[in-house]
Image (cartoon, rainbow, N blue to C red):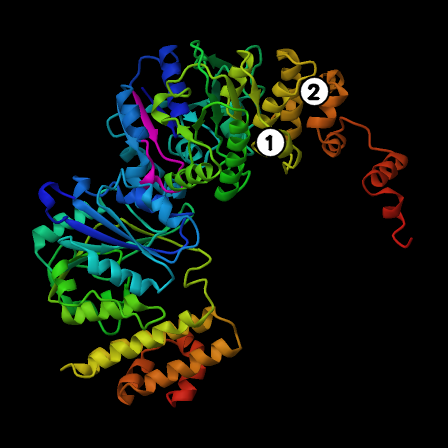
Amino acid sequence: MRAGGQNPLVSVIVPGRDAAEFVGDTMASLARQLVEPSQLEVIFVDDGSTDATAELVEAHREMLPGLRVLVNGESKGVSAARNLGLSQARGRYLGFLDADDWFAVGYLQLLVDQLDHLGCDFVRTDLVLADGTERKLVHAPQGRRGRVLAAREGVFPVTGKAMVDHPSMFAGLFHRRLADSGLLHFDESLPSAEDRELIWRLHLRAETFAVIDAPGAFYRRGLAGSLTQAMDRRRLGFLDAFEQVRRQLVSEPAADALLGKAAQTVLALTGQHLARGPARGPERVRLVSGAAELLLRYPDQVVRAAVRRLDRERRGQLAAVLRLGGWAR
Amino acid sequence: MSVLAAVHSRAGLDLLVAVRTSGGLGDDPVAVVTWSQLEIPEVGATDLAAEVAAAGFAEVIDLDALLRPFHPAQWNPHDAELALVRALLVPTLAPVTELFLEDVDHHLCRVLTKVFDGAGVHALAAGLAAYGPPSHRRPPALQQRIEALWYLDHLPGVRPVCVEPSKAMPAPPVPTAAATHTLVLGSDLVAARLGDAAAERRAHLRLLRTAAASGGEVVFRPPSLMGPGQLRLLEWEAAQAGIDLDVVDAATGPWGQRGRPAAAFGFTAPELAHLHSAAVPVSAPTVAELLARLSPYHHRARIELTIIDALLSADPPGYQPQELQQLLMVVSYLMRPESLPELGGLVESQLAELSPRARGRYLDQGRLVALGLAARPTRATRLRNLIKPGGWRRLKPGR
């Protein structure tokens, strides 16, 4: 912490469970973020680890003077872990990082400088998918860089990729006023895709944001426990997330356009999961029926407009959903 | 006229500096390309580019910085871009006429030989692999461009078999001031394709346990490519095993500013050879095991493992450079005969001088036969070989 008991400049919340294999890299990257490292508060929330994760994090106290370790005796989920960390965070700016990911050297300092300069509610960046030495840059879908934009612009365009389709909370930094108004609270009822729901909420309720040209947030791919590898109910969590999104949107003045964007995303994600998942079996049945059930709660004309925008390949992937909802013709 | 060098390790930089000190770089300005071999360069503790700058070279080109957020291992410019890359990479230098490349068969060095396709190539090899064949099949056009191999003289009296001329540079001497610690020298087993990160950690932990059991303070020099996460985990696991590790700072050189150790353990670190020559008790307990299961025969780690094993298991004990030279020549030829065709006749005579023990321990009979260096086994011999592992029962499964 800074001398005189002042609050830190940045708090980063790191939830982790059984991450001993990787957490050392994550902590090493956090030690190289700010010009003045003592201005960084790292809140590690150990979510019921059964390995040496917490002890390894503790071993970084010397290089991370602002380290705090909170321990959940049993796992309560990543959203609850992040919310716990958030409730303890004292920084002016808040960020998130999972225990197997990392930042480029000086990434947070760059974001702090931009937030100070631009004065907006939050900044977001491109991210990098890393698998061994293979890396893939994922561009934040906003062409205007370094400019303050209305947060709601992140929902548009309805017909193409928008910032709400770039749901990585760790590739960004957030002013603490967003947390104070409850906008950074993760929905603990969601088994997955909690960041999608939160990103929608942020872009709907916050005032301003900017996209910064700083591709320094690295996501480690291909881990056995990650969602892309999981074949369990967490895969279907996006349906619950988009039900929450729908509830927020129905009372909006331009509800149809916003719902159209959400419906299009539901169709796209469902198509991706159907294409990647097993060709038959109960998981597929649950996905098809769950997606149809969710979309039936959207206005019919909104879903039909979204279906009309599907290309031939996606239509083929979604044939069962479209038949079940009566949108096939 | 200018020189472009490329290094990716501290040992490579030390060798380059030695080459410069010997006058091998001439008087032309030298630019040095650096990159990291770490899987996550962003968390690496050492800054090789800064060390090169501190060593006083004219220009430093930090590929990690130029290519980020992409990993340098991904860099593979298209042929149509090579002229552009050449112009952008060293804009301040006159045409590059000489390349000095650490590990000339590394993907990035191959790229540099394409970018500067008119330059002569000097291979820099800091480790024990220098004494063996290329780690990859080398295109003849590249082999023709290699003007010299510069290596650290880890095995006095032994010369690399692959490139002529080869030029020996003095290796860092073993400290003379005696100390009481046991030195454990880590090796990059992942980079040598001897396992994944977890296997590398387990192997080092096993070594540390053995070293600790021998008594005394354990000083550990981690493998240069072990990331901070894996190192922390290894330190923690060692602590759980009751081993209090003193980890050497890589920036302090190969001996970590400690005196001459009382004993040393390791896998393939070249310093093991120096310590062995200096009569320090050296042990590499898993090397024979690694060597026995090494596959394919041309595995890049074979030369290093063979050298360490041959040094430590010599019977009778003692350093016999001529025998080692013969062994390395034969093993190298068996590994990459296409790279060393001129050795064929010589290998035949060297082979005859190898002891039966060395033939059995280091050579592959099938390969010898395939290369016409041994007679095809008779039917009776093949039967005997079949019987040995499983007995008669194996031949008559119905019984």
Say if A137 sits above or below B64 in the image. Answer: below
**From which residue to which does the magenta span run?**
B30-46
Q: Chain of mark 1?
A: B
Rendered image quadrant of residue B297: top right
Q: Quadrant of residue B351?
A: top right
Rendered location of residue A304, percent (x, y): 31, 86
Chain for mark 2? B
Q: Is residue B157 in view?
A: yes
* Looking at the image, residue B308 lies above or below residue B158: below
Residue B316's place in the image compared with A200, above or below, is above
User: Which circle's residue, 2 or 1, is located before the other in the chain?
Assistant: 1
Find disc 2 in the rendering and name its residue.
Answer: B347
Residue B172 location in percent, x, y? Answer: 43, 14
Q: Circle 2: is it few (<14), some (14-19), or many (20+) Cα within 10 Å?
A: many
Is residue B162 a member of the stretch shown in magenta? no
Front label number (2 vs 1): 1
Disc ID at residue B286: 1
Amino acid type, label 2: Val
- Assess whether residue B36 is covered by the magenta stretch: yes
User: Distance from label 2 to label 1 (Cα)?
Assistant: 29 Å
Q: Is residue B338 above or below residue A15?
A: above
**Secondary structure beneath label 1:** loop
Residues beneath discs 2 and 1 located on the same chain: yes
The image quarter in which residue B358 lies: top right
Residue type for callout 1: Thr
Crowd band around label 1 with a 10 angstrom C-alpha radius: few (<14), some (14–19), many (20+): some
Image quadrant for the C terminus of chain A? bottom left
Quadrant containing the N terminus of chain A in the rendered view = top left
